Image (cartoon, rainbow, N blue to C red):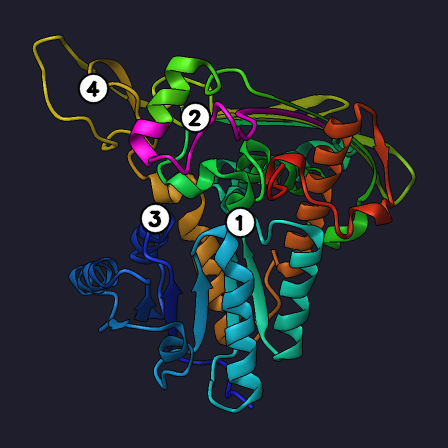
Amino acid sequence: MTELPRQILRVGFVGTGFIAHFHLKSLVGVRNVEVTGAFSPTAEHRARFAREVEALDLGSCRAHDSLESLVTADDVDAIWILSPNYTRIEVMRTLNAAIKAGRSKIFAVACEKPLARTVAEAREMLRLAEDAGLNHGYLENQVFCTPVLRGKEIIWRRAASTTGRPYLARAAEEHSGPHEPWFWQGDKQGGGVLSDMMCHSVEVARHLLTAPGAARNSLKVKAVNGTVANLKWTRPGYAEQLTERFGKAVDYRRRPAEDFARATVTLEDEDGNELMIEATTSWAYVGAGLRIQLELLGPEYALEYNSLGTGLKIFLSREVKGAEGEDLVEKQNAEQGLMPILEDEAGVYGYTDENRHMVECFRKGVKPLETFEDGLAVVEVLMGLYRSAEIGATLTFPAPELEHYVPVVARTGA
């Protein structure tokens, strides 16, 4: 048995791409943690990541040349799975096998959203974690966004306590499209924008509607209704852009995945009251950058948040010229004009508080707020939305037919 609490949690990263760097930056604001190992199939990537860890003074990080080497290292206590969606089930199988065979002393695992591409995969991720005796956390950063943490606390303490619980949550997230080719490939990613971003919107909305301290399954999903569409990237000029950027494997003229999704989720609380989630996500938004919009409505109150409504803005005239980048806001689309600035993206987006929470829970052997069980619940809703969009009708829950359902855009050869 692992002795808890551990003074320092030693973390190994599986995956060293875009999202891994967001997590790494956030760990600068987290105590009692070191990043001691990293694995990527690309030697240059893992070596660069290890150097960045040391530059940030987050520990002495070893670049491992195999997943087996990382999960059996004697200086790694917990694994953060940040690799592409289609790799995650194999990561968990490797970790499970190493622990069961006594080759690994890892006692905790955290996985980036979404937990899996299908309900069956998500259920297997949970089974593998529990079979290996792992404490497990689902990395849903929007639940830990600073405006969400502060807003929910105020609403439930000041307003819901006197006038009644909130009954409607709205969540929207949109940007101009992902960075890596696998996101655009339905079979590898598991879908399109609904799989990629609706996982955020559904879970942050469910979190806002859930009473503080209540079990995460205290709200029951009763029905879902979903719509998916291809609004931008199937247009010939934009489809050609994708192929030029990512190669022939991304061909939106023949194998597109949706770039717009809408969801309505009907829930029921412990007292039988009906609650609603309205959510939209898009890869077809061209603005300053990534935009997150949240609302929470109750009998006598409302919460509103827009991530681009920043207090800090900078104006750059036509004479200010430079290379394209994302130094002002994630998914930045311009370098001139009046630009909103997120001065601490890792903090505002929730990565710092999320990782602080996971580190402390794993150090002390406490169950996190978000677990693989929550990741599974989210995937069930996502698959329900895909199925609803496919049949053109509302889908009622429970829906056992979702257990092995695969979205149309993710079906091999579809």
Mark 3 and mark 2: span between their CA atoms? 17 Å
What residue does disc 1 label? Answer: 113
Q: Earlier in the sequence, mark 4 or mark 3?
A: 3
Query: Which region is colored magenta?
Result: 243-263
Residue 335, magenta (yes or no): no
Mark 1 and mark 2: span between their CA atoms? 17 Å
Q: Earlier in the sequence, mark 4 or mark 2?
A: 2
Which quadrant is home to the N terminus?
bottom right
Q: Earlier in the sequence, mark 3 or mark 2?
A: 3
Quarter of the rendering containing residue 127: bottom right
Residue at 48% in and 80% down: 106
The answer to which of 257 and 330 lies nearer the viewer is 257
What residue does disc 4 label? Answer: 335
Is disc 4 surrounded by few (<14), some (14 to 19) or many (20+) residues within 10 Å? many
The answer to which of 303 and 102 lies nearer the viewer is 102
Instruction: Give the mark toward the camera: 3 or 1.
Output: 1
Residue type pointed to by label 3? Phe
What kind of secondary structure does the magenta stretch mostly adopt?
A: loop
- Tag shown at residue 22: 3
